[in-house]
Amino acid sequence: MRVHVDPSRCQGHNRCVLLAPGLFETDDQGFAREANQGLVPPELEAQARRAAANCPELAILLDEGP
Ligand code: F3S
């Protein structure tokens, strides 16, 4: 699985960073971006889904592919 933050949608709510601190980081303006090039280790997939479901701007995209 991979995650991606759509920068055109992110408004800096930072729920993603709180819910999945290993998968997201903030830039110096408080907007999120994916950490580790968006790669999600299997043990963090539930966190990735939770973060995506809780982003008010629907800015987090999940790629369930290999
Ligand atoms: Fe941005 Fe959504 Fe996270 S608005 S900071 S991607 S919770």
Image (cartoon, rainbow, N blue to C red):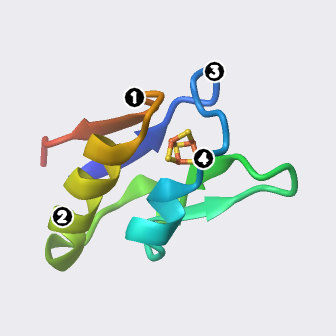
Q: Residues within 10 Å of mark 4 (few under 14, many from 20)?
A: some
Q: Which residue is mark 4?
A: 13
Question: Quick one: label 3 or label 4, which is nearer the N terminus?
Answer: 3
The image quadrant that residue 58 belongs to is: top left
Q: Residues within 10 Å of mark 3 (few under 14, many from 20)?
A: few
At which x and y percent is residue 44? Answer: 23, 73
Q: In the rendering, which numbered label is found on residue 45?
A: 2
At which x and y percent is residue 63? Answer: 23, 38
Q: Nearer the viewer, mark 3 or mark 1?
A: 1
Indicate left or right for 21 with 43 as reference. right
Label 3–label 4 contact, CB within 8 A:
no
Q: Which residue is mark 1?
A: 58
State the separation of the CA atoms marked 3 and 2. 24 Å
The image quadrant that residue 38 belongs to is: bottom left
Q: Which residue is mark 3?
A: 8
State the separation of the CA atoms marked 3 and 4. 14 Å
Q: Establish whether ligand 1 lies closer than 8 Å to the Cβ of label 4.
A: yes
State the separation of the CA atoms marked 3 and 1. 11 Å
Q: Amino acid at mark 2?
A: Glu
State the separation of the CA atoms marked 1 and 2. 17 Å
